[in-house]
Amino acid sequence: MAFVYKADPNRAALWVQLFARQAPQVPFRVWPNVGDPKDVRFLAAWLPPDDLAATFPNLEVLFSVGAGVDQLNLAQIPDDVKLVRMIEPALVATMAEYVSFAVLALHRDMPMYLSQQRERVWREHRVRPPGASRVGVMGTGLLGTAAIERLRSLGFDCVGWNRRVDLDSFLARTDILVCLLPLTDSTRGILNRHLLDTLPEGAALVSVGRGGHLVEADLLEALDRGHVRASIIDVCETEPPAQDHPFWHHPKIWLTPHIASTTQPESAVEAVLANMARYERGEVMLGLVDRSRGY
């Protein structure tokens, strides 16, 4: 019953230590030193080997080390292999923290102040109470729900959107839009010109789901004509963006390098081991992916 880790090599040593301490009975191996591939039943990876079935013929569970699975080609994962996305406290907490930072920054016009600093301009702008900014969070899963709860605790008028809610009505009441959707065929490119134009004049955007949600040219056009006043972006279609990409230097964009939410090895290993125990007992694992929905 071997377990293989194939992800961030900088974290591999800590995963080795944590498994040795918490599950010494489980043979733990780090890619590419997998031992006998026929012994491997569990794999934790960001990107699995290309020919997964041939590489690990007896694999039973593939754990994604990220909150989503859109980086995976689901067609290459055998149907009998269970796919599980990462659900662990640190991942949720850091996302709620980043979304709170981003919404507060947009509410308090920090991108504008950053631009003024570069231009050596000393000018204050009106400070409004949090309730004056209506926040809309696209995505009401674990991450979105945690973000909404945190924003409400800060005094923001915050609502969530999912497919059961009328999108245009949701957008019309949103001054700061946060995208935390999973990336699927139906959500790819959802942050497009039509959606941005449905927001009130002067709205702002936090793009923190996946780069594929955003039509980058449409956002740049909306920023340049002033319909969207500012955007904080943590995810891009290509990461990192090309050196000449407008996101690097646009005065209304604050860009961060896909750091909004990160797994912590200690809590990630605990989550994986708990799911392994559920699996062995025949119970449903937390984060089990419905392949028909893509998440």
Image: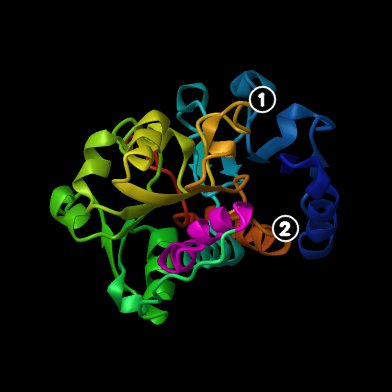
- Name the residue type under label 1: Pro
Where is the N terminus found, in terms of image quarters?
Answer: top right
Rendered residue at 47%/37% (across/down):
211
Q: Which residues are magenta?
A: 102-120
Residue at point 43% right, 33% down? 212
Q: How many marks?
A: 2
Q: Residue at 43% of width from left, 66% of height from top?
A: 147
Residue 265 circle label = 2
- Quarter of the image holding residue 94? bottom right
Q: Residue at x 75, y 42 (%)?
A: 8
Q: Secondary structure at mark 2?
A: helix
Q: Main secondary structure of the magenta part?
A: helix
Left/right of residue 113 with respect to residue 191 in the rendered view: right
Q: Is residue 156 left or right of residue 268?
A: left
Q: Is residue 191 magenta?
A: no
Give percent across and percent down for residue 149: 39, 74
Note whether 93 is above or below 84 in the view shown. Answer: below
For the C terminus, which image quadrant? top left
Residue 67 is situated, as x and y percent measured from the top left of the image, at 52, 49
**In the image, what residue type sits under mark 2?**
Pro
Residue receiving disc 1:
49
